[in-house]
Image (cartoon, helix red, strand yellow):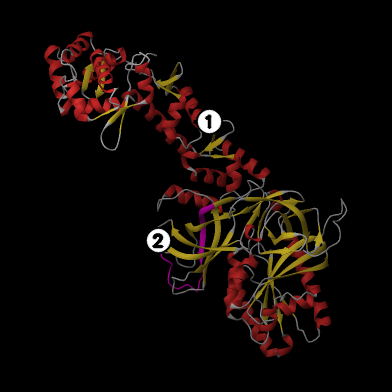
């Protein structure tokens, strides 16, 4: 970020900008062409100058006067050697057009083909061919090269693209002609750009260079894909999410107070270290991008890949200026061959900040016999989906709408993929590549067309199928509560929300419940929700059964009948089903008449209180006692003794040490010494 003039005065519009990638085979003259046009030697590294080949990305601006006014062309000189394709892909991320360089004395070569395929997969639809070294070819060779180039471009997006000739033997003459032809093309490309749509979305820029300037700090550069940024703005660096202030900004070497995408920009970040914003990181406005390890995408396999990729395939995915190993799964469960797009879910080994609509390249990984080859590429349809089942017709239909549908259909598709969780306006903005005004219009259209429904405030959106499923779930939860607790009038809304799904938005559930109430599918009984025909039953044990329970356990000390023996003893006095006996136990326990030592072991509370007092009186002087000593005091067999001993622990009267001995807890001992009731403690 070298010294530069001050920012342009307010009201002075900067020239239009266009980022043009310069691609092609190694040693075909890309760097020489850029140097001749701009005066900048993009091979700045000593190793590049020694070997005579580009290793890193090079950048150089060119000011052009065109019929649409001044245009700043930012050239990205991309390495041509096959060993540096990874850096070439980083440079191609975000370019507006490509200048494919072909040497007239060699014709189309392998890396030129691969570079063109990469640009095609990245969605570059504008470009031209720069035929260099024309002084080294005769007319016949030039004709053959022209045919070769025509065949290369024939079936792609650059079919019919013009060819510009250049030679370094007479730079001034060739430069003048080349710039005139390039200026006309640039004007066409600028006119074809979408006006203002990129700047309307939050700022996002993949970092392709990161370095430290003495006296300034960490500076990053990249081709900004979307949004605007100004001095003192806060930007988040992903992965990681650290936030840094923009201390300075430059566009093509000139300081600016603000920047609007698309185009190249350099940013001076206050407080950032190189490790915070390495090459491959993404800078974005807070809330402007999702960090994810899973994306849904449309994938196209290149024609040269003769053997279809497996339905689950390991590969290296290049996205933005980063690359990461990943698993690519065909959502149809079928192998992925060339000539047709495939809907896939990609599971990244490491999280990445990814935007909807972002393009990516797939290269074979080290485990593939095709290691190092570019084999496929595609477009992100959904940046943070849930896991999908294979051959899910609803998911495939939704992804089809995200790929080819209109804006309302894409809104509905994104909401459908979220299933029962629904999406808010902010979440929709992160999942759809639409400017705010277009997104608002699309949401309103989807609502009016019945594609989605709105619930809660702030609103969340669900597709009708998800609403029906959520309604059925709510009704089922209410029915389950009725079956479990028929003595209750229903279920309150907070409890209902937890039972339906604690991960779901409570306001959305409340909105769906209100719809059920309006339709009469549920009714409100005070603070509770219930089924329309539900009548609560007051479930109580008969007084005779409660009396029989007390009689059955009285007179036995701490050794009453337990379990089945207790049930038999009660039934002998008053026949009762097991459910009524449980009610009787609960009611007598609530009344304080009996105490439940453990399930099926019930004793009179007065009897237990007397035994507790006896234990304290006997063992307080000894400070601790064994289970055997407790047995001697209470006169119990092991069947009754162990539950009683554990009850003393659970009632927080005693504590058992690792040797199996017990001592009194401090607060219980204090109550005993003060003459207060130890158990049941006075309240």
Q: Quadrant of residue 61?
A: bottom right
Rendered location of residue 464, percent (x, y)? 48, 37
Rendered location of residue 146, percent (x, y)? 66, 82
The span from disc 1 to disc 2 (Cα, nearest Å) is 40 Å
Q: Quadrant of residue 45?
A: bottom right
Q: State left or right for residue 119 relative to residue 625.
A: right
Q: Which residues are magenta?
A: 292-311
SS at badge 1 = helix
What residue is pinned by disc 2? 334
Decide whether residue 296 is among the magenta residues: yes
SS at badge 2 = loop
Q: Do tag 1 and tag 2 residues touch (Cβ < 8 Å)?
A: no
What residue is pinned by disc 1? 507
Location of the N terminus (image quadrant): bottom right
Q: State left or right for residue 14 relative to residue 526.
A: right
Q: Residue at x 38, y 25 (%)?
A: 666
Q: Residue at x 55, y 36 (%)?
A: 460
Which of 554/203 is in front? 554
Decide whether residue 551 is among the magenta residues: no
Residue 437: which numbered mark, if any? none
Rendered location of residue 588, percent (x, y)? 27, 14
Q: Quadrant of residue 210?
A: bottom right
Mark 1 neighbour density, 10 Å: few (under 14) some (14–19) many (20 or more): some
Q: From this viewpoint, which residue is outermost toward the left? A: 572
Rendered location of residue 524, percent (x, y)? 45, 18
For residue 328, say whether it is visible: yes
* Marks 1 and 2, the one that precedes in the sequence: 2
Which of 274/583 is in front? 274
Q: From this viewpoint, which residue is outermost toward the front? A: 621
- Whether 605 is drawn above or below 182: the answer is above
């Amino acid at each position: 970020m070298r010294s530069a003039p001050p920012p342009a005065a307010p009201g002075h519009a900067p020239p239009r900008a266009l980022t043009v990638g310069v691609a092609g085979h190694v040693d075909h003259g890309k760097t020489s062409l850029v140097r001749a046009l701009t005066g900048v030697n993009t091979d700045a590294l000593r190793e590049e100058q020694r070997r005579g080949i580009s290793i890193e990305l090079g950048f150089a601006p060119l000011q052009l006067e065109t019929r649409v006014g001044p245009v700043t062309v930012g050239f990205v000189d991309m390495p041509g050697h096959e060993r540096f394709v990874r850096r070439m892909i980083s440079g191609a991320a975000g370019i507006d057009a490509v200048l494919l360089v072909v040497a007239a004395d060699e014709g189309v070569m392998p890396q030129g083909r691969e570079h063109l395929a990469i640009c095609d997969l990245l969605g570059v639809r504008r470009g031209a061919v720069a035929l260099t070294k024309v002084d080294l070819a005769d007319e016949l060779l030039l004709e053959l090269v022209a045919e070769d180039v025509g065949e290369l471009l024939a079936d792609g997006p650059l079919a019919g693209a013009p060819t510009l000739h250049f030679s370094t033997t007479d730079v001034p003459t060739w430069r003048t002609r080349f710039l005139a032809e390039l200026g006309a093309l640039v004007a066409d490309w600028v006119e074809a750009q979408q006006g203002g749509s990129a700047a309307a979305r939050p700022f996002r820029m993949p970092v392709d260079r990161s370095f430290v300037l003495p006296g300034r700090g960490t500076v990053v550069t990249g081709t900004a894909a979307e949004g605007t940024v100004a001095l003192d703005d806060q930007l988040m660096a992903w992965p990681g999410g650290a936030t840094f202030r923009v201390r300075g900004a430059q566009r093509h070497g000139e300081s600016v107070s603000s920047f609007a995408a698309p185009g190249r920009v350099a940013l001076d970040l206050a407080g950032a270290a190189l490790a915070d914003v390495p090459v491959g990181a993404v800078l974005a406005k807070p809330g402007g991008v999702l960090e994810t390890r899973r994306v849904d995408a449309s994938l196209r396999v290149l024609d040269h890949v003769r053997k279809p990729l497996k339905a689950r395939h390991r590969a290296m995915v290049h996205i933005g200026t980063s690359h990461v190993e990943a698993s690519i799964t065909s959502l149809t469960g079928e192998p992925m061959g060339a000539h047709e797009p495939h809907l896939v879910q990609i599971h990244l080994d490491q999280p990445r900040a990814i935007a909807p609509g972002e393009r990516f390249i797939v290269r074979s990984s080290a485990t593939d016999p095709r290691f190092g080859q570019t084999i496929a590429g595609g477009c992100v349809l959904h940046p943070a989906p849930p896991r999908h089942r294979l051959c899910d017709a609803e998911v495939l239909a939704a992804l089809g709408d995200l790929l080819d549908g209109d804006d309302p259909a894409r809104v509905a598709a994104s909401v459908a993929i979220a299933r029962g969780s629904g999406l808010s306006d902010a979440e929709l903005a992160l999942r759809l590549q639409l400017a705010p005004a277009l997104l608002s219009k699309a949401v309103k259209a989807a609502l009016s067309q019945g594609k989605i429904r709105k619930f809660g405030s702030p609103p969340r959106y669900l597709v009708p199928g998800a609403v029906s499923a959520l309604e059925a779930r709510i009704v089922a939860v209410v029915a389950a509560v009725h079956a479990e607790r028929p003595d209750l009038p229903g279920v309150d809304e907070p409890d209902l929300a937890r039972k339906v799904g604690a991960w779901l938005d409570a306001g959305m559930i409340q909105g769906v419940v209100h719809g059920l109430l309006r339709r009469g599918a549920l009714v409100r009984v005070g603070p509770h929700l219930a089924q329309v025909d539900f009548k609560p039953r007051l479930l109580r044990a008969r007084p005779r059964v409660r009396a029989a329970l007390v009689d059955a356990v009285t007179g036995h000390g701490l050794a009453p009948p337990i379990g089945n023996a207790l049930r038999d003893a009660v039934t002998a006095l008053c026949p009762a089903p097991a459910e009524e006996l449980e009610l009787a136990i609960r009611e007598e326990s609530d009344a304080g008449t009996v105490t439940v030592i453990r399930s099926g072991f019930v004793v009179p509370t007065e009897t237990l209180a007397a035994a507790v007092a006896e234990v304290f009186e006997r063992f307080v002087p000894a400070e601790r006692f064994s289970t055997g000593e407790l047995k001697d005091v209470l006169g119990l067999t092991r069947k009754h003794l162990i539950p009683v001993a554990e009850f003393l622990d659970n009632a927080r009267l005693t504590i058992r040490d690792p040797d199996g001995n017990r001592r009194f807890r401090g607060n219980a001992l204090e109550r005993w010494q003060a003459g207060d009731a130890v158990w049941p403690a006075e309240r």
